[in-house]
Amino acid sequence: MTTLYKENEASFENSQTLDALIHNFDHIFDNCRDVMNLFSLSRSLILTTNRAGFEGTGYTLKELQETPIDKLYPPEEMNKLFASFQRLESDGFAQEKLKMFVKNGELRDFWIRSFIVQKEPELLALVHSIDITEEIRNEQKALREARLASLGETTAMLAHELTNAVASIHACLKLIEIDPDCSFSSNGIQRFSHAKASVQLMENIITSIQHYGRLSTNSKSFSSLASIIDESLQLLRGYLDAKKILIFKDFTKDLPFIWVNTSEIGQILLILMKNAAQAMESVPRRELRFSSTLKDGSVQLSVIDSGNGIDKSIQDRIFGSFVSTKPVGAGAGLGLSIAKRLANSNGIKIDFSSEIGLGTTFKLDFQIHDGTVQNLTENETVLPLTSKNILLVGDGTDLIIKIERYLGTRGGKVIRATSAQYALKILGHERINCVICEEDLYPYDEISFIKEARTLFSGVFCAMSSRHNEELFILEKTRKIDFILQKPFALDLLDELLVTKLHEKFHQE
């Protein structure tokens, strides 16, 4: 390639007239994959370009000749461009990295080498431009990914340390609360309540960070859309409050659960919320609305902002990589392309509508999972747990995963909550038929969780235990829970007990 380029350069320099130069240019460089221009320094005019020049920039030759140079290059690039011209005139050669606007408005990076091919009667230069935009973006992407990986490790470590610290504070407050010798004035009681609420808030934030930062897997589960939105809002609450953004939620009651990877849906929502907040920075009315409804066999979520809207010139490529509405340096333009990829992997249709000055609405359509299982036996036509919403509370232990899979094969719609806080949010939002809970439910113990959950839920309650627990037996006798399963136990026993208790519950109603 280098030898061919030097031969082309030599034959080009041997041309005698301008017409001959242009003829040789077309003959020699038309099939070159890089952009080649013949440029008159005397007239500051592009005389001709090759096919790659037209295809790479989108301009016609007439448009290149008639467009003012300050429209082709950003203001910060003009000094570099003129300095390159000066070196070219004095040394006969110059090279520079420059940013240039192509016809569709995109700013692209070029590595440009120029050399003089004629001095008289007109000063002409051959300009060789290589588009290095993708190379630069790939380098920046690799650097960002490395930084994000490092940030993820740091966040996980920080969350772990904060968990221990908050657990100590929580334990101290609990001891103070149950100490019979401890008494407070009315102001003291109020301050103690504020302290408990603050600790609870810290626990919620830490749990949300740990839930969001957990490594994404391909596993999906039945999930409450309202609860996923609440988890995501919890993560961005401080950011949204600082920007004085009002949050409105309008959810249709008793929506079906969605079958998704909750971590990935949370990531989509964070991207949409962050973009909406930035779009509303310059408007006086800052409102972010979440609206959900059941439409055409799917759960439809609308995320609506009152921002400036998206310019029509980029709407058709808004989900592309490196497309950004923000100022240079304020964003990489990867957020919506990531959101689109995650939506596709979860079978979600994502679309938007936007008007300048009126705001933007993103719509996500979640397909409703019918809960059927492919590997049923021939004689099993009606599953015993069909259409039953079962909330499984516990982290990803082998037993929890086995229970989730087994109950799914019996027709149940299993929603897994990895923390007590997340489970309580689901119970506050959704219709649940049965709750099955593990022992270790930080920051709650199992008894505290059951008591609080019972204020929100009246269905069948199963508690799992690996040891004798007198308090659990008292709760069973007083019918706060329906049955206790001592570990280890057979899964078909859980199935039989659930079916029996659910049947009794429905007959009582």
Image (tube, grey):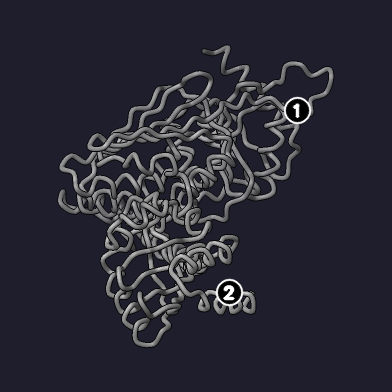
Residue with the most extreme bottom position:
91
475 with respect to 279 (left or right): right
- Mark 1 and mark 2 lie on one chain; the one further toward the N terminus is 2
How many other residues sit within 10 Å of disc 2, few (<14), some (14-19) or many (≥20)? Answer: some
Instruction: Give the image location of residue 400, x and y in percent.
Output: 65, 44
Q: Nearer the viewer, mark 1 or mark 2?
A: 2
Query: What label sits on residue 294 in the rendered view?
Result: none
Label 1, label 2: how far apart the Cα atoms are: 66 Å
Residue 8: assigned label: 2
Q: What element carries label 2?
A: helix
Q: Which residue is drawn at 75% across and 32% down?
A: 492
Please name the amino acid that badge 1 sits on.
Gln
Residue 484 position (above or below residue 300): below
Q: Label 1, on which residue? A: 374
Who's the residue at 57% across and 45% down the image?
394
Residue 55 vertical position relative to residue 317 in the rendered view, above or below:
below
**Nearest the eye: 424 or 72:** 72
Who is closer to the viewer here, 506 or 185? 506
Q: Check the image and report above or below for 277 versus 181.
A: above
Residue 176 lies in what quarter of the image?
bottom left
Point out residue 480 in the picture as x, y percentages from the top left corner.
50, 31
